[in-house]
Amino acid sequence: MKITFLGGGNMAAALIGGMVERGFAAADIQVIELGADNRERLTARFGVRAVDAADDAALACDVLVLAVKPQQMKAALAPLAGRLVRQLVISIAAGLRLADIGRWLGAPGAFYTRLVRCMPNTPALIGAGITGLYADPSVDAAGREAAERILGAVGSTVWADSEAQMDAVTAISGSGPAYVFHFIEALEAAARALGFDEAGARRLAIDTVLGAAKLAASSEDAPGVLRQKVTSKGGTTEAALASLAAAGWHDALVAAVKAAERRGRELGAELGKD
Ligand SMILES: NC(=O)c1ccc[n+]([C@@H]2O[C@H](COP(=O)([O-])OP(=O)(O)OC[C@H]3O[C@@H](n4cnc5c(N)ncnc54)[C@H](OP(=O)(O)O)[C@@H]3O)[C@@H](O)[C@H]2O)c1
């Protein structure tokens, strides 16, 4: 499978690193990237071919991964319009809709449809991401499998049933690391208020989240059951959870995710404007 990346920044580098580690041949990977420094870095680190414009060799691929910023996409696709024939196109750009990408990629008056839209998250940069994917109905099983293998190089994958669900993926796992960082900040602040120095407070907060997430991921019990197992009647955890419930913490988080989903829909409409 020959793969070309359009855009060779942070996320492309993480994907290429993960793919090479999992046995993809560097000779089968190319990158179209404007920045000379990025091109040199990618070639030196991974041995991939990196060029500054979409030449015929770069487009002689099975899969094209769109990895430029959403606001750079329309201009980046202009030189490719009407030049794709059979390639599977995978966009990792946040918020951009398939119809807009298809319109920008097609020959004048035509749409390109062999498209998959993905939403990775920032832990993908260390190989611990979660990516939501949605494929145009014209993409066959082999195309879906190829997308899963590529995004699977930087973490786990989940398919969305509809493109509208990608705004929900963005709100849950795309923005999700920020919610967790915010939780860590609050736990750290509480530890500081109870007398720990900065380093000790941060260690307590981060390792608590890390350990609890690992336990939740490896346990057969649902998170709610694990929570109940830590919560003894009349104990310290029960006192804390009662305080969180009184503050409306659970509902506040659900409302926050819904606000992110609404904003995702608005941004998608703005980004796709011609
Ligand atoms: N980073 C994340 O954790 C994350 C998470 C989810 C989704 N994503 C998505 O992943 C995509 C890439 O993000 P990133 O963080 O990797 O961005 P990035 O580091 O800025 O990488 C984009 C690269 O594309 C280059 N570029 C711009 N226009 C180009 C063109 N016409 N032809 C070829 N290359 C071009 C940019 O060069 P210049 O710098 O010179 O403009 C830059 O090196 C974005 O669409 C983002 O929404 C990223």
Image (cartoon, grey):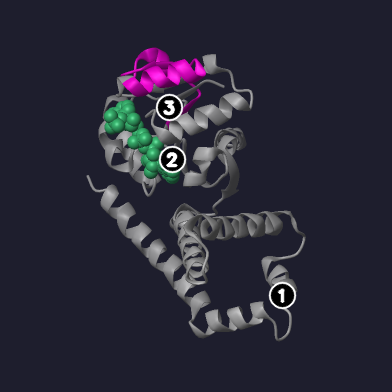
Identified by mark 3, the residue type is Phe
Q: How far across and down, in percent of the image, does residue 121 sit?
A: 48, 47
Q: Nearer the viewer, residue 257 or 125?
A: 125
Q: Amino acid at mark 2?
A: Ile
Rendered-image quarter of ligand 1? top left
Up-down relation of residue 261 to residue 36 (above or below): below
From the top left corner, tell me how far across and down residue 130 is, in percent: 55, 47
Q: Secondary structure at mark 3?
A: strand
Query: Which residue position holds label 1?
Result: 228
In the rendered image, the vertical position of residue 229 relative to residue 5, given as above or below: below
SS type, badge 1 = helix
What amino acid is labelled 1 in the image? Gln
Q: Which of the labelled discs sits on residue 92, or is there none?
A: 2
Q: Write down the region rendered in magenta.
A: 37-65
Q: Residue at x 37, y 29 (%)?
A: 7
Residue 20 or residue 158, whichever sits in front? 20
Placement of the N terminus among the 4 image quadrants: top right
Decide: marks 3, 2 in contact (CB < 8 A)?
no
Distance between the Cα atoms at labels 1 and 3? Answer: 46 Å
State the residue at coordinates (24%, 48%): 273
For the residues labelled 2 and 1, the Cα–Cα distance comes to 38 Å
- The residue pinned by badge 3 equals 5
Mark 3: few/some/many CA within 10 Å (<14, 14-19, 20+): many
